[in-house]
Image (spheres, grey):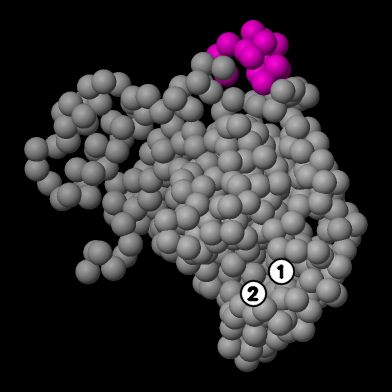
Amino acid sequence: MHEFLRFDPTDPAWPARIGSCLLRHASMLLYGLLHLWGYDVSLQDLKAFRQWDSLTPGHPEVGHTFESTTTGPLGQGVANSVGMALAAKMLSAWVDVPGEAFQVMAQRVFALCSDGDLMEGIASEAASLAGHWRLDNLVWLYDDNGITIDGKTELAFSEDVGQRFAAFGWQVLHADGHDAASVRQALTTATTGASAPTLIVCKTHIGFGTPRVDTSKAHGEPLGATDLARTRAALGWPERFHVPSEVAAFFKAASEASGRPGWTGMMGCAWRKAHPAEAATYDALWSGEVPADLWERLVAAAPGAGATRKISGAVLAAALAEVPGLVGGSADLTGSNGLETKHGTVGHPAVGDGAFSFAGRQIHFGIREHAMGAITNGMLQHGGLRPFGDVPRLLRL
């Protein structure tokens, strides 16, 4: 996976990172990789997994360790990833110069998702929008193991996930989730000339190498001392929390080759000198600075009376003029809530009548309130933008 990511363990919030969102029950995979890549996650932290006040909670929390998002509620993480990919596209449209080899915000977003994630409705809402926006910088790897806590997924889940995503407009690929070469080939295809988001269906066996392989007991219960010993014997693994020297060396080299020095060199010298206007926009967006008297300006823009949604619309129009990274929109209530920004509609230029652009600031979420919330959260977590969405319909009753 490191071949496709771009990161800096000394600066986890590096704006040009290419990041990942992990399904909530893969948290130890996340923590293990952070440790191997050189982030400030020690073996002692790994041993404290799921313990109170540890750096390694069972469900990752954004800002607690080095996570991109909080993935506890199933479906939220993958929906957040759509917002991250959209934010990268929008920022790229504002600061990158077409045709140049060096692209400041040429980012990709990867997400590992589970059967549970793809059962949740919010994931379908977000995936539908990702396909509509043709977010070719987004890749989901689906851990298709056919098992949930209650038993086999066939108890409640029998659809063809690949066909569903193809209908959303995604590129759908297949890989053997236990074969690194197979996964690498799929990732290469997904990141080479794709014109749509990609779902990679990775067939796997839950509890691989353990006596509980392909059973629900491998999902929701600890292995126990006996089965753990059998698993280590089957895999030829000497002890718990063991990092072979060759593995440590491999990950150290991978981390050092993550791309930060080259990006920083181009960004700090040639690119800034060649494109001062774009550099100024980049700095303004990532600084998050607003006028010192913003509050006073917004109060002055508010009408003295009228429906609250109309007052809100007037204040929003003023805010859009003062805050360059302010973007957002409505779940099909643009006119009702006064959310028309007149700053261009966000979307892929090839969709519709050609009026869409990732350089716009007005987002139409359609009737997808849940996805709107998750996507705007993902955009905020990405950084560089200040997203907003309208209130859910239920609040209008």
The residues tagged by marks 2 and 1 sit, at their Cα atoms, a distance apart of 7 Å
Q: Residue at point 55% right, 14% down?
A: 277
Residue, disc 2: 115
Quarter occupied by residue 208: bottom right
60 and 371: which is toward the camera: 60
Task: Give the secondary structure at mark 1.
Answer: strand
297 and 234: which is toward the camera: 234
Type of amino acid at the residue the image marks with label 1 = Asp
- Magenta part of the chain: 264-278
Residue 47 visible (yes or no): yes
* Mark 1 crowdedness (10 Å alpha carbons): few <14, some 14-19, many ≥20: many
> Which image quarter holds the C terminus?
bottom left
Quarter occupied by residue 316: top left
Mark with earlier residue (2, 1): 2
Residue 160 visible (yes or no): no
Query: Where is residue 366 shown, x and y percent of the image?
Result: 47, 59
Query: Where is residue 238 shown, x and y percent of the image?
Result: 81, 64
Vertical side of 22 occupied by 38: above or below? above
Residue, disc 1: 143
Quarter occupied by residue 205: bottom right
Q: Is residue 267 magenta?
A: yes
Query: Where is residue 108 shown, x and y percent of the image?
Result: 68, 43
Q: Residue at point 57% right, 18% down?
A: 278
